[in-house]
Image: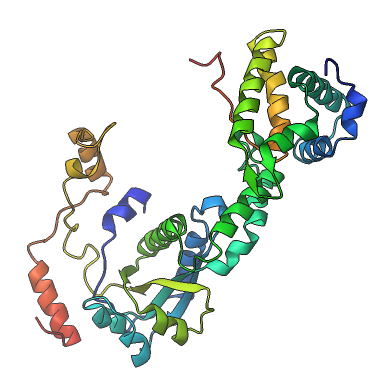
Amino acid sequence: MELKEVIGIRRSIRYYASWRPVEMSKLQKMLEAARLGSFAGNMGLLRAVVIDNTNPSPEVIEAVTGPGSAVHARMAPVLIVWYVDVADRQDWADRLKELIDAGALNPSHGWSYTFAENFASFVVGALKDVALPYDMEAMDAGQAIAQATLVAYEEGLGTCLNNLDREKFKKILKLPETATPLVIQTVGYPAESRDAGGQRPRRPFERLFFLNEFGNPFPRDPAVVEELKGEKMIQEPAPAPWRKKEISALAHLFGLPE
Amino acid sequence: MSEVDIESLRGSRRVGIWLEEAHRQQGSSPEEDERRLAVLARFCAFVDRTPDEMIDDVLDFDAGKMRLKGRRFYAEKIEAFERAQEGDAFAQRAAANLVRSFFIHNGLFLGTPKAPWLP
């Protein structure tokens, strides 16, 4: 499947085939994709604990806090807790030097070993009392998780991101004090149809993106939209005519209210 | 300082850091070092400062701070130095960039203006 189609078919999946295990190789591919994400200065603070949720632990389910999230957290055979560990900020100078050695950061942009050491020392010093991930670290984590998510769909899986109780998960997973759980991702084969009733609604393009200044909408070329439809990135909008019946069937299957 | 002896630069701690890093990234070449040092010597004469003094003018390592006034001074002086060099724009830029390289490998990026030959 091409990248654009994977983006197009991604839905937040809330009904999982709990009876069908997820192959370890597919989970590894998700983690490999996250590892290759873009990390500012190669800091790379994102970590994850993959939980075998074949027999859901009540303690774990109780710590999944998003509205309705506990329902699909019980169904999904795998849960991934993504977290950031700020302890690894300490070796940032070495990470920057790796980028210099790799030819990613170069003197043409002002990078040298000495600059890397000075800069890392300054930033790490400024963040020494900041236990939570700062903006860039959180954004890096989000990008990496997005890559893992797209790989999951390319592998035929479905996922959904959910809120969690940070303190409870730190305790359950025995995470270090320096860790901040960000999100818990349910992972499994969808019990619902692949397109889950169509592409979910989004705010109008023109309200989201601007050219040169706020208020001047970025022009949306209908020809590009058609091209993306052909490449299956833009798909039939939800709800498909049969979606309500599918939900009804799924609710019956899983013994859930309608 | 009207003229600077190249040999005197070799004893500078800051020049040592520069050459060591440059060698690690670009490989060691005695001829290239001669060229580097000759240009740096000209710049030292241009601003009447030693290499170590130039870095100390901008970076306060004890306090962990950068002196913005010093940074601006050297950024402007390098641009003036570039314009004062003989040869075409490429040669002028190449000389100025060697001086910038000296600052970069000592932890200080002064910025590089857009090349005059670019549209």
Please state the horizontal and vertical placement of residue A250, each as a whole percent of the image: 16, 79
Numbered marks: total: 0
Picture quarter with the C terminus of chain A: bottom left
User: Is residue A164 rendered to the left or right of residue A100?
Assistant: left
Query: Residue at 13% of width from left, 59% of height from top?
Result: A238
Residue A97 or residue A196, whichever sits in front: A97
Q: Residue furthest top?
A: B87
Query: Residue at 68% of width from left, 24% of height from top?
Result: B97
**Image: A100 above or below A87:** above
Q: Quadrant of residue A22?
A: bottom left
Residue A161 is at least partly visible in this image: yes
Please state the horizontal and vertical placement of residue A24, each as a whole percent of the image: 48, 75
User: Is residue B55 rendered to the left or right of residue A134?
Assistant: right
Residue B27 is at least partly visible in this image: no
Please state the horizontal and vertical placement of residue A167, each as a whole percent of the image: 41, 81
**Image: A65 above or below B49:** below
**Image: B53 above or below A161:** above
For the rendered model, the colour scheme is rainbow
User: Is residue B111 rendered to the left or right of residue A224?
Assistant: right
Please state the horizontal and vertical placement of residue A150, each as a whole percent of the image: 37, 59
Q: Quadrant of residue A10?
A: bottom left
Query: Residue at 69% of width from left, 21% of height from top?
Result: B96
Q: Quadrant of residue A90?
A: bottom right
Picture quarter with the N terminus of chain A: bottom left
